[in-house]
Image (spheres, helix red, strand yellow):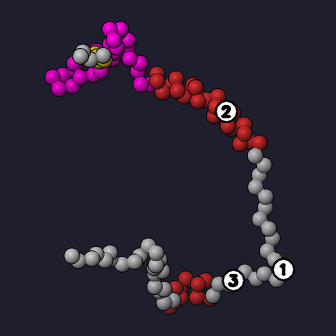
Amino acid sequence: MEPHLFIIRKQKRDSPDKVTLMLAYYILDGSIYQAPQLCNVFAARVQKLLPLLHQNWRRLDMIPPAPLPPPFPDGFIPPKTTEVEKDPENQQEVEPQPPVVDPIIDQGPAKRTKF
């Protein structure tokens, strides 16, 4: 069975090793077509998308702003920072805290059964 699709490239040879592609043609079931350039394909798709994006933009403008967070309850006192944390000179006196290990993620090496 013969192939139904052939691709022909028109190209310019700049040197023995360098070739510049100029156009591409394809033959499908005996009909010859010029293949579109990639930039033209992208431009056509963007032109089709612009009206849809414009409609979505209008919808986003219709969304009301997010409500303000609720106020803190009466008597709430924010946690205070200690003097050691405020003073950069005393930063060396603070003992480094051990890293927090997530028990789900860090379970150690995998255990395999031996046969």
Q: Is residue 83 left or right of residue 112?
A: right
Q: Which residues lie in the magenta part?
A: 10-39
Q: Is residue 34 magenta?
A: yes
User: Disc 2 marks which amino acid?
Assistant: His
72 and 17: which is toward the camera: 72
Label annotation for residue 43? none
Q: Residue at x 77, y 42 (%)?
A: 62
Residue 75 point in image, percent of width and height: 82, 83
Residue of label 1:
74
For residue 90: magenta? no
SS at badge 3: loop
**Circle 2 is placed at which residue position?**
54
Kindly identify the amino acid type of the residue bearing the numbered disc 3. Pro
Q: Earlier in the sequence, mark 2 or mark 3?
A: 2
Q: Residues within 10 Å of mark 2 (few under 14, many from 20)?
A: few
In which image quadrant can residue 39 be found? top left
Q: Which mark is residue 79?
A: 3
